[in-house]
Image (cartoon, helix red, strand yellow):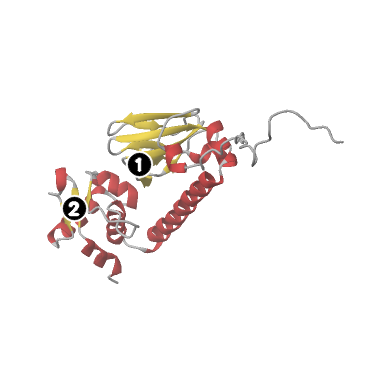
């Protein structure tokens, strides 16, 4: 004869098991990383004509231009200055420190009010190794910069000063880039334009007056900026 077992009647169905698995962190967002300060990252606002770093300074950080324009200049041992680049929003600069460059090879100066993120070298190296999405964005920047340098070299070797000036003005106004062009660019001195294309200020003044008479540029743009017309392309395309 079987003995009945006493106790509570087992419940039907299985009991819910709480999910104790750790939640997955959100995917890394390079834009969000560059939009805020954090460990090894600091944000600095600059007024126009301020030096971010000078030629010969210690190279210990990479900079990301969140807003504004910055020019990079190099001064020779004889005191001659050349503008090697005009940087726009979303550009990195100062990356030479990542390849053991101990001193800055150029001077970075703001052309407009700027918001700039400073990334310490160690923080930059860490995120490049840890986050493929960020590394891809940075490599894309480097490749675009390299292409621009090659184009500048070809322009300097084979084109006249007039064509070089027209190309620089169109680039500053973002013609030929993705997105909508910005035909009105902030005030930029003729001396700076001369340093960019390797000629004298008097030659730049001559060509700018010519462009104005032809309707290619207008000095009465928004807030006193220089308005660039897409018809300036005719100068580059004309043989």
Say whether residue 77 is visible. Answer: no
Q: Nearer the viewer, residue 19 or 167?
A: 19
* Disc sitting over residue 157 in the figure: none
Q: Is residue 184 left or right of residue 164?
A: left
Crowd rating for badge 1 (residues with CA inside 10 Å; few <14, some 14–19, many 20+): many
* Disc sitting over residue 71 in the figure: 1
Residue at which label 2 appears: 227
Crowd rating for badge 2 (residues with CA inside 10 Å; few <14, some 14–19, many 20+): many
Q: Measured from the top left, where is residue 222 in percent x and y?
A: 15, 47
Q: Measured from the top left, where is residue 137 in percent x and y?
A: 48, 48
Residue extending furthest bottom?
239
Image position of 156 with respect to 86: above or below: below
Q: Quadrant of residue 111?
A: top left
Image position of 44 with respect to 136: above or below: above
- Element at label 2: strand
Count of residue discs: 2
- Element at label 1: strand
Residue occupying image coordinates x 24% and y 67%: 234
Q: Measured from the top left, where is residue 100 in percent x and y?
A: 58, 37
Q: Quadrant of the C terminus?
A: bottom left
Residue occupying image coordinates x 27% and y 70%: 238
Q: Quadrant of residue 150?
A: bottom left
Q: Measured from the top left, where is residue 169 in percent x and y?
A: 27, 54
């Amino acid at each position: 004869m079987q003995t009945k077992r006493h106790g509570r009647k087992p419940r039907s169905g299985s009991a819910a098991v709480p999910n104790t698995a750790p939640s997955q962190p959100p995917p890394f967002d390079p834009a969000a990383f560059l939009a805020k300060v954090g460990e090894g990252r600091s944000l600095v606002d600059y007024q126009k004509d301020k030096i971010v770093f000078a030629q010969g300074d210690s190279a210990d950080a990479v900079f990301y231009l969140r807003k504004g324009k910055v020019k990079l200049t190099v001064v020779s041992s004889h005191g001659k200055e050349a503008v090697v680049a005009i940087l726009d929003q979303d550009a990195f600069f100062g990356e030479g420190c990542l390849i053991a460059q101990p001193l800055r090879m150029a001077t970075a100066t703001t052309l407009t009010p700027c918001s700039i993120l400073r990334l310490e070298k160690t923080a930059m190296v860490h995120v490049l190794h840890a986050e493929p999405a960020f590394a891809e964005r940075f490599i894309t920047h480097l490749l675009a910069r390299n292409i621009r340098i090659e184009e500048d070299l070809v322009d300097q070797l084979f084109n006249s000063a007039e064509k070089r000036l027209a190309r620089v003005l169109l680039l500053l106004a973002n013609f030929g880039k993705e997105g909508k062009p910005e035909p009105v660019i902030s005030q930029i001195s003729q001396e700076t334009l001369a340093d960019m294309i390797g000629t004298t200020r008097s030659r730049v003044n001559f060509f700018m007056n010519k462009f104005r008479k032809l309707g290619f540029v207008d000095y009465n743009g928004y807030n006193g900026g220089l308005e660039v017309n897409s018809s300036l392309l005719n100068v580059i395309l004309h043989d």
